[in-house]
Image: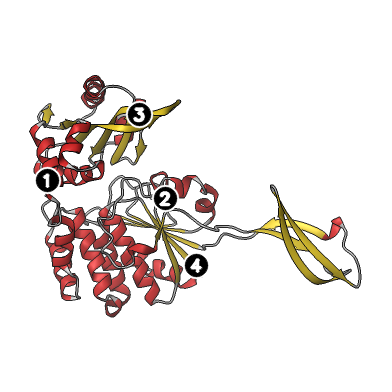
Amino acid sequence: MLTQEQQIFEQIKKASNILIAFKWSGDAVASALAMFLFLKKLDKNVELAADKFASDRLYSFLPGYAEIKPGLENLRNFIISLDITKAKVSQIKYRREENRLNFIISPKDGWFTEDDISTGASGFKYDLIIVVATSDLESLGKIYDNDTEFFYQTPIINLDHSSTNEAFGQINLIELTAVATAEIIFSLLESYSRDLIDENIATCLLAGMIAETKSFKTNNVTPRALLAASQLMSLGGRREEIVNQLYRSKSLNTLKLWGRVLARLIGAPDNKLVWSALSAADFLKTNSTEKDLTDVIDELIVSIPQAKVIAIIYESENSFVPDNPAPVKTTNLLLYAIKNLDALALIKEFSPSGTKYLAKAVIGAPIAETEKIIISAIKAKLDKLPL
């Protein structure tokens, strides 16, 4: 009987075109890039796609980053067939007239009728999907929502380390004791051929582990994880580059913004819920943007391990709210929740977007009023949960 690792590579060998998809996180993007580079070494046709919610250029230093696409292109082709039994074709042209595309076919030795024309759709572009560090297909965002039929009709290999993973693949390699999906993929690739893991692949895998453990500061770091990190460094993983890019490249303006977040930090009860509020003037005076807030949340996760939910409530000057065409000052919410909680469910009445772990909502109301409403709503839901 084949092991899961052997089953995965059997599927990969049979596949002609492979899609790697993931929800956006440091571990996910780094793991997906490592898998992408490895499959390229096996001479596979492979592409990367992710709905880039809350993403930035933080991981753009990783090899292959530019190959990530924000959606699925030319997933299926529409085919117009012409029966040439009764007549041959001498020339084909096409012309666009307003909303119509006219194909002009010049017959040779005969004529065509309507009965000679038929239409249909090709098969899907990819014959295998590898989903990385994603608990459920819905978390893929528009990558999944726009083409659900594709995901139901195509074999899926599901690689993850999260306890909330719904095991949606035909093959599910889920290891709860791993600190990151990158650790699982390292073991998977090593089982096939350690010699194929070059410096770029090792760097991606090491970056995934460093990102997921906040540079090995989280309390779930294991001796096995440290050994894997050591082996990746011996294979050429560029630890110094990773740490410099992820943790030592913060601008003075970003650090000033962090200071304002920390100065207004509030926790209740027992710091299980932690939040802070920022005005539009805070961004203006520190010359920073809302993209810098994701890094703030990462720091709070490490610094306050008892926190189950972290909320950043902030003001923006020129936002748009539904049914209001004019830009107005609005209040935004960025909410992080630990693995056994659902950030989207905690703020569902505010029509959030994002994932179970990091959700965002836009509320067309003043920040002071919104802060009270949001925190009250989250507290009420947390009080009903066993934390």
Select label 1 or label 4 by which is in front.
1
Look at the numbered disc 2 and give the secondary structure of its residue: loop
Look at the numbered disc 1 and give the secondary structure of its residue: helix
Counting from the top left corner in percent of width and height, residue 257 is at 14, 40
Outermost residue, bottom direction? 195
| Mark toward the start of the polypeptide (1 vs 4) | 4
Q: CA distance from mark 3 to mark 1?
A: 31 Å
Look at the numbered disc 4 and give the secondary structure of its residue: strand
| Residue at numbered disc 4 | 17
Residue 275: image tag: none
| Residue at numbered disc 1 | 255
Residue, x 35% and y 40% (percent of image)? 354
Color style of the picture = secondary structure
Taking the image as shown, residue 124 lies to the left or right of residue 20, namely: right
Counting from the top left corner in percent of width and height, residue 233 is at 16, 71
Of residues 255 and 232, the one nearer the viewer is 255
> What amino acid type is highlighted by mark number 2?
Phe
Of residues 255 and 385, the one nearer the viewer is 255
Q: Quadrant of residue 124?
A: bottom right
| Residue at numbered disc 3 | 348
| Residue at numbered disc 2 | 168
| Mark toward the start of the polypeptide (3 vs 2) | 2
Q: Is residue 331 visible?
A: yes
Q: Quadrant of residue 238?
A: bottom left
